[in-house]
Image: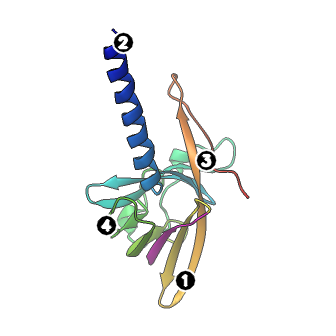
Amino acid sequence: MYKNFNIAAAFFIFFFAEFSIAHEEDEILGYWLTSQSIVLVSKCDSQLCATIEHIFVDEGTDPKSILDENNRDKSLRERPIIGINLIEGFEYQKGLKEYNGGKIYDPGRGRTFKSNIYLLDNHNLKVEGCLMRLCGDEEWQALKVTFDEDGTRSAVLKYEKN
């Protein structure tokens, strides 16, 4: 009996050690708090994607009713903002802390910009959008999202501000 317990204990220790190492290497993957939304950065095939999961709106407004009305492509103006993938052209590489040469879509402006993404030492994600040689950036904060039994979710900052 103790032999089986030791084997099972060793398996769980190995599994959780591997999981925590993998998690550290993939810090870019997960939920992020932006200035106007919550975004899920995940691996989509071989690329990174950043899907809008929630947008902040006035109380009483259904976030799903907010449309991509500023999109330069008129055929996309009726789609909800929630569910849009914001980034493209970033080849996913496990453990990479800097992604260059992709594009990011800004629903507020309805435009796509050249983009770079940096995982900073403070665990924030610096997302940069550039037009010609002028660049602007925003830091996204990592979130820990909990899924409740009733299907609701709650989120807290994953890392304390220093």
Pointer 4: residues within 10 angstroms few (<14), some, or many (20+)? Answer: some
Pointer 2: residues within 10 angstroms few (<14), some, or many (20+)? Answer: few
Looking at marks 4 and 1 on the same chain, the residue that comes earlier in the sequence is marked by: 4
Majority secondary structure of the magenta segment? strand
Q: Find disc 1 in the rendering and name its residue.
A: 135
Estimate the spatial distance between the alpha carbons at disc 2 and disc 3, rounded to whole Å.
Answer: 38 Å
Q: Tell me the amino acid under the disc marked 4.
A: Glu
Q: Which residues are magenta?
A: 113-121
Pointer 3: residues within 10 angstroms few (<14), some, or many (20+)? Answer: some
Estimate the spatial distance between the alpha carbons at disc 4 and disc 1, rounded to whole Å.
Answer: 21 Å
In which quadrant is the C terminus drawn?
Answer: bottom right
Estimate the spatial distance between the alpha carbons at disc 4 and disc 3, rounded to whole Å.
Answer: 25 Å
Q: Which mark is residue 2?
A: 2
Q: Find disc 4 in the rendering and name its residue.
A: 91
Q: Is residue 119 magenta?
A: yes
The secondary element bearing badge 2 is classed as helix
Question: In the shown orientation, is residue 38 left or right of residue 21?
Answer: right
